[in-house]
Amino acid sequence: MTKQTAYIQPLLILLLYSLVSCEPNQKAFRDTNEIKQMMLDYRTAWKAGDSAQILQHLSPDIVLFQPGKQRAPIVGKKAVRAFWFPKSEIAYPIINYKIEHEEIEGGNKIAYYQGLSRLTWYTLENGIARDTTLSVSEFSNILRKEEGKWKIYRILYNLKDPKYSR
């Protein structure tokens, strides 16, 4: 990771906090339950393997920042779709997707949803299940209200050791 890339995530988070603090309704953020439900629906879609439902929760302007990658972030819903759901004979069904230390704050049009993610999946190839994997990451999702609905606008995460806890 280059020095410039290493500073992108903290700067984006700092920018988000700055934007949120400028919004007039910060003290009584009224969309917390709406965001919790949207993110629960998003995780449920992942567990069901429903790519169309997963993508419905993303902004068309989504940017996916990958931890430790030297290449540019993945930009746009079409590019994220190609990255997450490539045409392949191999599938990665989700067994479990839990969030801990959930934190939500925001304003009228922008918010953040962050916490600790525990995601378990397995590899399915030619009908044979193998290689169960647990991925633990601290994440920050920046959300944007678009046409009255909250959408995931930016995804930032940092992979941790599977035994990691806060």
Image (cartoon, grey):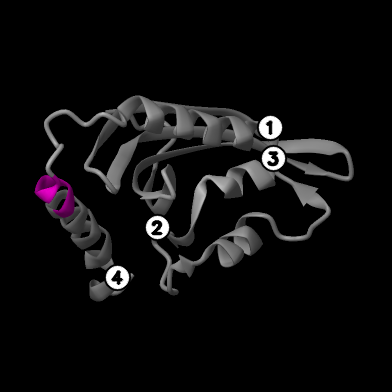
Question: Element type at marker 4?
Answer: helix
Residue corresponding to mark 4: 5
Label 2 and label 4: CA atoms lie apart by 10 Å
Q: Looking at this view, is 67 or 156 the one in front?
A: 156
- Residue 115: % across, % down: 32, 34
At x 31% / y 31%, what residue is drawn?
31
Question: Element type at marker 3?
Answer: loop
Which of pointers 4 and 1 lies earlier in the amino acid sequence? 4
Q: Using a 10 Å C-alpha cutoff, classify the residue at mark 4 as few (fewer than 14 neighbours), some (14 to 19) or many (20 or more).
A: some
- Kindly identify which numbered label has been placed on residue 67: 2
Pair 4/1: label in front: 1
Q: Looking at this view, is 166 or 74 the one in front?
A: 74
Q: Are marks 2 and 3 in contact (CB under 8 Å)?
A: no
56 vs 98, left or right, is right
- Asked if residue 41 is positioned above or below residue 153 in the image, the reply reads above
Label 2 and label 3: CA atoms lie apart by 25 Å
